[in-house]
Amino acid sequence: MQTVSQIDPLRQAVATLRQQGKIALVPTMGALHEGHLTLVRVARKLAAHVVVSIFVNPRQFGAGEDLASYPRPRERDLALLAGEGVALVWAPEVPDMYPAGYATNVSVSGVSDGLCGANRPGHFDGVATVVCKLFHQVLPDLALFGEKDWQQLAVIRRMARDLDLTRPCVADIIGVPTVREADGLAMSSRNAYLTGQERADAANLPRAMREAIAAIGTGEPVEGALEALRSALLAGGFASVDYAELCDADSLAPLATRGSAPARLLVAARIGKARLIDNMAA
Ligand code: PAF
């Protein structure tokens, strides 16, 4: 496995790999867990070579968020990726990604606006900007993202369609289902912030979501089910609920009633130092 942190060696390494077949890109911010490794394993089945980017992207963190404390276990991450047969790790530093004078922003309106976009202004601009750059840097045949960040996936798909980044120009974008702990908690690098009791309480999030989905499925009014979900989280150790919404699975438009189109329940809630997000088909 080769690790590069400058754009010229990256382009050379990618060009060599490309001669041998398709390239899959798995963008990450490091602090890898089983969810990331699942993306790598799926990628290995779909492409000859897997390139993983590790970059804690400052543009997607707001003021007062956890940019400085975001876990950066670089040696452990590299060992895990080597064990998964990754060909190339792209690990630029901030000045390599955003050199002095950098001035361009990619902003995807509509799908970025609600949910996490409303709670974290500028977050999805940061994600869209860095993913757009990663696509141009690596020119992958396909790129894989976890469905845990459902809104992020929707933003990236919209950006890729709007900027003509999907094949044949750049990438097929593949969403991979969320990987969960035994008690149902979605895997996340931020779960590392949870203390013992908070970690136990965090399992109330997927539990309350499943209950809300079941209630909606039996015809309970959506707002009543969402209110019960919020109350269950606050009673179950969560300090606050940023949002709990039933949305159209593609446009992310909020749904007041469960229609026939695919729907998704999306929640963000705070416990201890962590802000946890999750989503499920509803
Ligand atoms: O999901 C993440 O880890 C990040 O948002 C991503 C896609 C790597 C962009 O920084």
Image: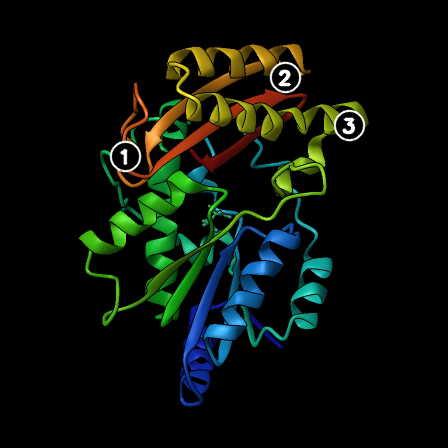
Calculate the distance from the C-alpha at mark 2 to the C-alpha at mark 1: 32 Å
The reply to whether the residue tagged 1 has its Cβ within 8 angstroms of ligand 1 is: no
| Placement of the N terminus among the 4 image quadrants | bottom right
What's the mark number on residue 195?
3
The reply to whether the residue tagged 2 has its Cβ within 8 angstroms of ligand 1 is: no
Q: Which residue is mark 1?
A: 260
| Tag 2–tag 1 contact (CB < 8 Å) | no
Kindly identify the amino acid type of the residue bearing the numbered disc 3: Thr
The residue sitting at 46% across, 15% down in the picture is 225
Give how far across and how far down residue 63 sits, in percent: 48, 26
Crowd tier of the residue under label 1, counting other residues whose Cα lies within 10 Å: few below 14, some 14–19, many 20 or above: few
Give how far across and how far down residue 74 sits, in percent: 68, 57
Kindly identify the amino acid type of the residue bearing the numbered disc 2: Phe
Calculate the distance from the C-alpha at mark 3 to the C-alpha at mark 1: 41 Å
Q: Tag 3, which secondary structure?
A: loop
What's the mark number on residue 275?
none
157 vs 5, nearest the viewer: 157
Point out the frontmost of discs 2 and 1: 1
Q: Quadrant of residue 274?
A: top right
Give how far across and how far down residue 237 sits, in percent: 68, 15
Q: Which residue is mark 2?
A: 238
Crowd tier of the residue under label 3, counting other residues whose Cα lies within 10 Å: few below 14, some 14–19, many 20 or above: some
The residue sitting at 67% across, 15% down in the picture is 236
Is residue 100 visible to the viewer in this orientation of the structure?
no
Q: Outermost residue, front direction?
A: 218
| Placement of the C terminus among the 4 image quadrants | top left
Point out the frontmost of discs 3 and 1: 1
Kindly identify the amino acid type of the residue bearing the numbered disc 1: Ser
272 vs 96, nearest the viewer: 272
